[in-house]
Image (cartoon, grey):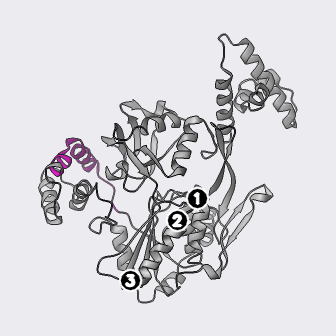
């Protein structure tokens, strides 16, 4: 066991003790490095001023090794992280329903806050209005820059029905507390409905699992029965998930060619996933609009990128997150393991969007930036609990009553009436799971509907869009000309 632990010792200790072992040879092979690591491990364990638990050295070593890669997606998974991963894979757990990330380095100028990648549909986080891009600066009063990502997860997850308060920083100056009650987080995958008074099928893909393609087929079958003539695929705040789920969904739209390819220095990781004509379920005559935003990542970018490169869908919204790498989990024991980036994926036009993202064909933002005065008013409104208290006493408000209350609040808090209606509506509907969209607030969805209804030649519109390869080539050319 000790030899195994020693062999796993971190590159971090190599950096710290490099001077002790410097031999000037840049071609030292792996075996020699492992001997050095083993020597450091033995020396520390036998000579440190206090007795050292081998497990602490082992875990610190592996964390350091992963951190040395400089890749936020390659991480050591301790027992807590493995439990979180298992819970998510199993499909349910107790928590608040937020996908989060955290920078490893923190400084007074740039604190390492917890960033919300997306809020899971119908969870406490989503119902409280927490958004992609929000920063969690504290949890129950404890500053997050001082926490590891594992400690953050441990604080957010817990017994169902128990409260946790997160301090949110939105934008530059909007800072407010949100009290969440932990609930069972059911990992959903697809919600769908026909848009009211139309022949437009609306399909929201929440995340990709092995069941996503089957649920998408359920939606398409339902749309077919109801005579749909166009389709909106909503990938906003979809953090990804199982890549094969995205591939299987894409295969329902693409009849031939590469859906996605993976490239690596490892031969067995170089793969091409191609479409099969026999699996195509959607006619090319069906106009398709895909909604994306900065919370759309990984597998959702595979789907949106493939549909864009083949000119099968028109993208509306905001630039996607930009995660173009593939990870695999390896177990070290029943309690721990590690996640390692093994390859990068490429869209059909052969580009990688990692740290770049996918730009929409039409950029539409649901909210313009607040002025400093509006930010101050927004924070005051949220901290006042005016909306929560009113809705608690009037739980069954109609749209007319929501609008009237918004106008009343606007006299004190001069904010956009549409935003105020949204904040009230979120509270009114927070316990309902049958609400699929909000046309009053959702400018991106409205733009998609408008485009479908007003475009006479949708096929011509799609042919005029640019592939991701063309867009990246143009960006490189512009960059070169600027230099």
Quarter assignment of residue 38: top right
**Residue named by callout 1:** 242
Structural distance between the alpha carbons of marks 2 and 3: 21 Å
The answer to whether residue 143 is above or below residue 296 is: above
Label total for image: 3
Residue 205 visible (yes or no): yes
Q: Which residue is mark 3?
A: 226
Label 2 sits on residue: 212
Q: Secondary structure at mark 1?
A: loop
454 vs 129, nearest the viewer: 129
* Front residue of 305 and 194: 194
Query: Mark 1 packing: few (<14 Cα in 10 Å), some, or many (20+)?
Result: some
User: Answer yes or no: do the residues labelled 1 and 2 have beta carbons within 8 Å?
Assistant: yes
On screen, 162 above or below 282? above
- Residue 307 in the magenta stretch? The answer is no
Neighbours of disc 2 within 10 Å: few (<14), some (14-19), many (20+): many
> Residue at horizontal 48%, vertical 62%?
319
As measured in the structure, the alpha-carbon distance from the residue carrying label 3 to the one carrying label 1 is: 30 Å
Q: Which mark is residue 270?
A: none
Q: Residue 331 in the image: state x and y as whole percent.
A: 68, 42
Task: Give left or right: position of 136 versus 240.
Answer: left
Mark 1 and mark 2: span between their CA atoms? Answer: 9 Å
- Magenta-colored span: 366-391
For mark 2, give the secondary structure.
Answer: helix
Regarding mark 3 in the picture, which secondary structure is present there? loop
Asked whether the viewer can see residue 108, the reply is no
Q: Quadrant of residue 32?
A: top right
Please indicate whether residue 72 sits to the left or right of residue 221 in the image.
right
């Amino acid at each position: 066991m000790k030899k195994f632990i020693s062999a796993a010792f971190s590159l971090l200790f190599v950096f710290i003790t490099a001077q002790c072992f410097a031999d000037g040879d840049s071609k030292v092979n792996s075996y020699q490095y492992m001997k050095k690591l083993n020597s450091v491990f033995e020396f520390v364990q036998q000579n440190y001023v206090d007795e050292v638990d081998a497990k602490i050295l082992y875990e610190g070593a592996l964390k350091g090794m992963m951190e040395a890669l400089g890749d936020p997606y390659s991480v050591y998974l301790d027992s807590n992280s493995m439990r979180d991963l298992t819970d998510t894979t199993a499909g349910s757990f107790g928590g608040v329903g937020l996908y989060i990330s955290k920078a490893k380095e923190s400084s007074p100028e740039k604190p390492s806050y917890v960033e919300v990648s997306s809020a899971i549909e119908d969870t406490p986080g989503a119902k409280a209005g927490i958004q992609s891009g929000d920063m969690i600066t504290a949890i129950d009063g404890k500053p997050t820059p001082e926490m590891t990502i594992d400690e953050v997860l441990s604080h957010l997850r817990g017994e169902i029905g128990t409260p946790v308060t997160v301090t949110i920083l939105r934008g530059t100056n909007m800072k407010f507390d949100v009290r969440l009650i932990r609930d069972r987080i059911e990992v959903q995958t697809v919600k769908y409905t026909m848009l009211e008074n139309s022949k437009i099928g609306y399909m929201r893909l929440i995340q990709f699992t092995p069941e996503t393609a089957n649920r998408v087929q359920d939606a398409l079958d339902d749309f077919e029965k109801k005579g749909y003539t166009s389709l909106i695929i909503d990938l906003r705040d979809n953090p990804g998930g199982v890549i094969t789920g995205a591939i299987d969904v894409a295969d329902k739209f693409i009849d031939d060619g590469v859906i996605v390819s993976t490239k690596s220095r490892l031969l067995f990781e170089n793969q091409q996933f191609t479409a099969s004509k026999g699996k195509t379920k959607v006619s090319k005559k069906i106009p398709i609009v895909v909604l994306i935003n900065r919370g759309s990542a990984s597998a959702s970018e595979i789907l949106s990128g493939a549909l864009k490169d083949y000119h099968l869908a028109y993208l509306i919204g905001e630039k996607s997150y930009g995660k173009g790498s593939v990870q695999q989990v390896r177990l070290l024991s029943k309690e721990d393991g590690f996640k390692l980036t093994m390859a990068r994926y490429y869209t059909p036009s052969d580009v990688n969007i990692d740290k770049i993202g996918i730009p929409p064909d039409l950029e539409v933002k649901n909210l313009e930036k607040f002025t400093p005065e509006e930010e101050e008013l927004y924070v005051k409104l949220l901290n006042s609990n005016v909306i929560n208290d009113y809705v608690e006493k009037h739980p069954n408000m109609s749209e007319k009553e929501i609008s009237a209350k918004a106008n009343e609040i606007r006299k004190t808090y001069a904010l956009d009436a549409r935003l105020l209606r949204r904040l009230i509506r979120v509270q009114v509907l927070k316990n309902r799971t049958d609400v699929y969209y909000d046309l009053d607030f959702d400018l991106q969805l409205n733009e998609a509907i408008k485009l479908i209804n007003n475009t006479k030649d949708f096929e011509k519109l799609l042919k005029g869009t640019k592939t991701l390869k063309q867009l990246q080539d143009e960006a490189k050319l512009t960059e070169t000309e600027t230099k």
